[in-house]
Image: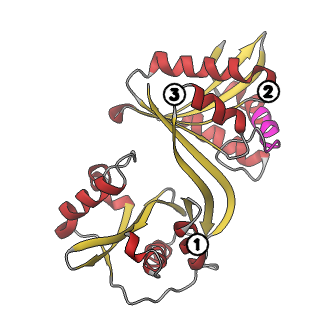
Amino acid sequence: MIKVINEKQETEVADYVWNVYQDAAKRTTPPYKSHAEVLSQLQKQISSKHGRILGYYKNEQLFGVLYLDIIDKDSYVGTAGPYIHCSEHYHQVALSFLDYLDNYFIGYSCYFGTTKPNLSSQKFLDDQGFKCIDDTIQTKINPTTLNSIISPYKVKVLSEDYYELYRRFHQEHFSDYFFTADKIYDSIHRWKIHIVIIEGVICGCVFSQKQTESTGEVYGSIVLAEYQDTDMLSQLYFENISAWFSEGLVEIFNFVPEGVQLEASKRVGFTEYDTYMGYHKTL
């Protein structure tokens, strides 16, 4: 039986999620440092107008938890979880959660986040027709670890003069992202986009969003193939992150694939702390 969790169950659910999180093979995203952090995030999710937490109960016993972020106007539903402790019941519980999503969010773009060691979640999502669109390393940076990068490329902050040029670039290189260029432009005050233009062509970009009053997240980064062996991407990261730190943010997160992007981000001072795999399907 699926129940929508409220304040009365928050302690029980926080205990369950923290217990599951201790097992790396069952851990999902986001990462937690403590039980208190789990409880705090759970309370925010319950009180958020876009948040919902589901619990799977059998004979009044909790067998699974799923966090939802819902944006109805964009037909978007994102999930953290499912947190399922008992491997024997994984498929049954996960399928019940998916049935709930299928019933309540028909036509929505659905995104699941998990971690590399959680093979059960990956197999389940693969079997249910979800496509893995992110296979990344979770990294983070703060002002004390930021390294200055100097290279010959001129990095620009995206201005309205280049909106149309960037719109085409974004569509070409980030076509499967939820945040299209137009969605970003609609709330541009929360975003920073840094680009390099050479002879009228965008050759690289980094775009990031402010998450809270103290944190932000890089949502996308790329340089064209002919610049992958240069410091262009590292310089883009540096300029983008520096701009946020100058406004008072103290930590920036970045989920990047192994290879060029990971190495470029590490040169700037990002450090690894977890893994992330993102799956997508239209319900």
| Residue 149, percent from left and from top | 50, 86
Rendered position, 102 above or below 262? above
Tags 2 and 1 touching, CB below 8 Å: no
Q: Residue flagged by tag 3: what amino acid is it?
A: Gly
Name the spot of residue 155 as percent of width and height, x first.
34, 80
- Give the residue type that dot 1 points to: Glu
**Which residue is pictured at 18% across the width and 60% down the height?**
164
Residue for point 31% across, 59% down: 188
Is the residue marked by circle 1 packed among few (<14), some (14-19), or many (20+) residues within 10 Å? some
Q: Residues within 10 Å of mark 2 (few under 14, many from 20)?
A: few
Tell whether 75 sits left or right of 129.
left
Judging depth in this view, the residue of 222 and 97 nearest the camera is 222
Q: Quadrant of residue 86?
A: top right
The residue at the point 38 percent across, 75 percent down is 226
Residue 21 falls within the magenta-colored stretch: yes
The CA span between labels 2 and 1 is 36 Å
Q: Which residue is mark 2?
A: 87
Please name whichever residue, 62 or 200, is drawn nearer the observer in this view of the structure.
200
Residue 173 appears in which quarter of the rendering?
A: bottom left
Q: CA distance from mark 3 to mark 1?
A: 32 Å
Residue 49 in sight: no
